[in-house]
Amino acid sequence: MQQAWLVLVCAAAVVGIFVYGAILWCVVAYRRDRHEAQHFTGNVPLEIACTVIPLLVVIGLFIVTYLDEMPVDRVSAQPESRIDATGFRWSWRFGYNGDRITSTGTPDVPPTLYLPVGRTTEIDLTTSDVNHSFWVPGFLFKRDAIPGMRNAFDLTPTRTGTYLSRCAQFCGLDHALMTFVVDVVPDDAYDRYIASNGTVKP
Amino acid sequence: MIEWFTATDHKKIGIMYIVATMTFFVAAGILAMMIRAQLARPDNALLSAQLYNQIFTLHGTAMIFFVIAPFGLGLANFIVPLQIGAPDMAFPRLNATSLWLFILGGIIMFLGFATYGGASANGWTNYAPLSEISEGTGAGNDFWTIGVLMAGVSTILTAVNLTTTVFLLRAPGMTMWRVPIFTWEIVATSLLILMAFPSLTAVLFMVLIDRHLGGHFFDPVYGGNPILYQHLFWFFGHPEVYVMILPYFGIVTEVIATFSHKPVFGYVGLVLAAFAIAGLSIGVWAHHMFTTGAVSNPFFSAVSFLIAVPTGVKFVNWIGTMWKGSLEFTTAMLFSLGFLFNFLLGGITGVMVASPPIDYQTHDSYFIVHHFHYTLGGGSMFALFSALFFWFPKIFGVRLNETLGKWFFWLMFIGFNLTFLPMAFMGIEGMARRVYTYPNVEHLALLNGLATAGGAIMGIAFLLFIANVFISAFANVPVPSNPWGGYSLEWATSSPPPEHNFETLPPITSRRPALDLMNT
């Protein structure tokens, strides 16, 4: 995902420099007191070039984002672990190991989602009331929770640490407080958490 | 007074549209100030969550359905018949129907604040099932739905009227390829409305049926589908953003050409680009749904990227119109240049969020708030003020004060960028939109403080504009028929125009009949 960000920000900067430059040039060079207007109504070769070149640029940008999106959307057939996440107004419930361990938050006490570092974890996302969205800004990623739908996606965190996360889809009164914490922990600590049925916190 | 309530003259209706949209603008602007006051500091407790949610919902809905979209069409009501040399709109009484449906719709929506439980608090998108349950069950929610329904139907009727007027009521000699760009943009807008708005009417009726008649369109327990709501809503909703920008593209084209003292560069290209944008905009709606996991992201991403091409053509033509011109920096021109400056950034960030992997971070965050305020605020709203300064003499027969106007422009420009530029960084740092409070993490306190300061500057600037209107009205200096050296036909009649618009129609032999008249 960093790649799409990098390429698009660079492309934006280049386009911005050209177009802002041209606008500023007009404003400075063609002021009424400095410049007599020349009358022309178009320049067909220039206009065609200015259609074809942007077309090629956006095709290039599309290819970059398409290649970048594929690994993000891919869901592994054999994930190394699996966690159920359920959004409700206004907190989250996380269930590990077939719901043998569950943790349910409140708007005032956000729950923690433990993820093993370096492993592919499938998150099965649902909601028990309205639309929500599972957003981990530190992972540059979100996915919506939609009533009647199970949204599965893979997360493979590469660094341990805690990430402040939240619901992104407006869901009513206390949407602002619908936060949670993602804690990426060493995989042996995660395994102990699962094996002890949640008694040994990572 | 009674002559205004019963008016069918397009000029009176146009004036009432402008006055009504500016009144709703003041109301929606006050709501915006309350939003910025609440978000000035982290963990602020100025407004309750319930009230804040109502305020941002009505701010967005009012700006979209009762300010930016109807101002463009209301202005078209006044200007289009003059630009094509028609005595009135094709269906004058239908026109009055549109106006009053729109005004009453806006009043009904705002009256939601007076109901038990307050106004609608679902956001302007009114997503089901949220809009069908819990705190969304109050009467304020139904007031919102009925009000927006009325605005939507009014818009469809106006689109029928404008299209018919341009196709059938053009003066002798006014061929389609001589029609000014503003009128062309209105034709493209109207056809787009006819394609997209019925979907809004349908989805709002479905919500009403679910809420009051036991329907289950969006309830999965009974086989309904919440994704269906999003499809129907955005099938209208994305074309709607072009309904809110195409008329304003027309405005800046006229203003830039007039004050560069040059013909429009690439007239045919501009027209084709307008229709390309309108056509493509029908096929991009699901880019609002990239994070649902329920749509084909690559398809909608590709079409969204493509819209950048005709929009780029427009920038080439605006710059081409200024190129080797003789630029006169009136307030109207400054606002159009401000439009170019702000809208370019909004367009660039628009291309970024057309990429699903970027959208996965920015969707429903302040990055999106940043993006669409640069297109609809820094873009459409700046063009709106450009239009007011440009056509004020034609509509009201007096010129707005230029010195006060330039102060207004610079304060707005600085205030606008100070408010909305920091929002890009808030979004990337993880601040979601539609939150009444946020924690003091990263740089959110600083960025929000800047945004609130910018909002205050815009508020002060707007007071300057209101003062300008009153000062200019009392000064009441009469203006000639063509005060700016404009080229299109409306500048060939008196300011304000007589009852049936033209005492005698000048011969129309080119795209610049008013200039031809001056030179003969």
Image (cartoon, rainbow, N blue to C red):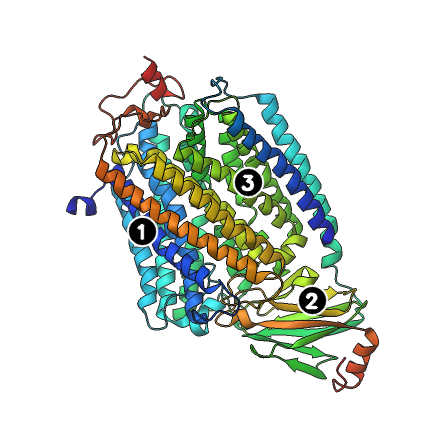
Q: Which residue is at the front of the view, A21 or A41?
A: A21
Give the quadrant of residue B515.
top left
Q: Which residue is mark 3?
A: B344
**Looking at the rendering, in which quadrant would you find the C terminus of chain B?**
top left
Q: Which mark is residue B23?
A: 1
Q: Where is residue B267 drawn, in percent x and y?
A: 48, 26
Q: Residue at x 28, y 39 (%)?
A: B91
Q: Residue furthest left?
A: B2
Could you give the CA–CA distance between mark 2 and mark 3, rounded to whole angstroms? 37 Å
Could you give the CA–CA distance between mark 1 and mark 3, rounded to whole angstroms? 28 Å
Q: Residue furthest top?
A: B520
Task: State the SS at label 1.
Answer: helix
Disc 3 residue type?
Answer: Leu
Disc 2 residue type?
Answer: Ala
Disc 1 residue type?
Answer: Thr
Give the quadrant of residue B48.
bottom left
Task: State the SS at label 3.
Answer: helix
Q: Which residue is at the front of the view, B457 or B94?
A: B457
Please determine whether, in this image, residue B520 is positioned above or below residue A131: above
Question: Is residue B305 at all visible to an observer of this figure?
Answer: yes
Q: Which residue is mark 2?
A: A152
Please determine whether, in this image, residue B127 is positioned above or below residue B183: below
